[in-house]
Amino acid sequence: MKKWLADLHIHTLLSPCAEVEMTPHHIVMKAAENGVNLLAITDHNASANIAAAMEAGQRYGIKVLPGMEVQCKEEAHIIVLFDEFEQMQCWQELVDQKMLPLRNDPGRFGAQFIVDADDNFLAEEDRMLLASLQLEADEITDYCNNLGGICIAAHIDRPSYSLLGQLGFLTGAMALAAAEISPRGLEELTKKCLKPLVGGLPYLTSSDAHRMEEFISGPKTIFYLETPTVAEIKLALRCEQGRSCLPGVFIKT
C-alpha cells in the first residue's frame, strides 16, 4: 500500500468566500512543497477550476480528484468526489439544473474567479454559488453514488451548514461514506457522545481551506491505498482489504 497524505476539502478563488491567492496552480504547488500528494478541489456548487487544478497536478505529480461542496435544500453542505473529470461534468449539469437563478453580489459575498493552470484570468462567475440547490440531501447522495462518486458529510460538528446541525441526526438512507470533522472541531473525534449521532460513520479531516494559511495549517488525513481512487478511499474508510486511514494529521513545518 502507498501512503497518501490527503486534503479532500479545498476551495479555489471560484468560491466567493476564498482569497484570490487560492488559485489551482498555487494550491498544487504548495501541496507539493509540503508533502501533500492527494487533493480534492471542492468549490461551492461549482467545478470550473477543477480542470486547471488537474493539469497543475500532472505537472507536480499530485493526484487531484474532481469534487464539489454542494449545498442541499436543507442548507447543509455535502462533499462529493469523483475519479474522472467527465463524471464531474455530468454532476455539474445536474447542479446547473437545480441552482436557483440568483446573481452574485461581489461586494457583499466576494468575487468568483475562473482561471487556468497558469493562474491566468479566464472569467468571473456571475451566478450566486452560495445558495441551496433544489435537491434534498438524500437526492444528492443518490445521484452522486449512481455516478460512481463518494459523499461525505461536511464539517458535521458545526452548528450551521452541516447535516448534523440542520437535521440533528444522520441516517443510513443518506448513503454517506464518511463524516468530516472541521479543524475547529477536531477534539470531537474522541467524544463518545458524537458517535451515535453520526450513525457510526467513519471520520476524516480536511482543511476546508479558503486561504493558503488554512491549507498549510489545517488537518489532513493519511490514506493507505493501492491507487488514489474513490473505490479505494471507500475501502480505506471502512478499513477493508488492507486499506486504512488516519485522520487528524498535520503538516510538520
Image (tube, rainbow, N blue to C red):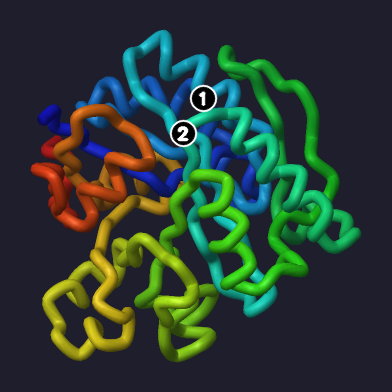
- Residue 34 horizontal side relative to residue 153, left or right: left
- In this rendering, the answer to whether 127 lies above or below 90 is below
- Residue 178 horizontal side relative to residue 24, left or right: left
Q: Residue furthest top?
A: 59
Find residue 188 and report its image quarter.
bottom left
* Mark 1 surroundings: few (<14), some (14-19) or many (≥20) residues within 10 A: many
Q: Secondary structure at mark 2?
A: loop
Q: Which mark is residue 53?
A: 1
* Mark 2 surroundings: few (<14), some (14-19) or many (≥20) residues within 10 A: some
Residue drawn at x 36%, y 48% as measured from the top left: 214
- In this rendering, the answer to whether 71 lies above or below 60 is below
Q: Amino acid at mark 1?
A: Ala
Q: Can residue 18 be seen at all in this image of the molecule?
A: no
* Front position among marks 2 and 1: 2
Q: Can residue 77 be seen at all in this image of the molecule?
A: yes
Residue drawn at x 30%, y 62% as measured from the top left: 183
Position of the C terminus by quadrant = top left
Q: Which residue is mark 2?
A: 83
Task: Tell which circle, 2 or 1, labels the residue nearer the N-terminal end.
Answer: 1
Position of the N terminus by quadrant = top left
- Residue 206 horizontal side relative to residue 176, left or right: left
Residue drawn at x 45%, y 24% as measured from the top left: 26
Find residue 141 and report its image quarter.
bottom right
Q: Secondary structure at mark 1?
A: helix
The one of 242 and 205 positioned closer to us in this rendering = 242
Q: Distance of mark 2 from mark 1, alpha carbons?
A: 14 Å
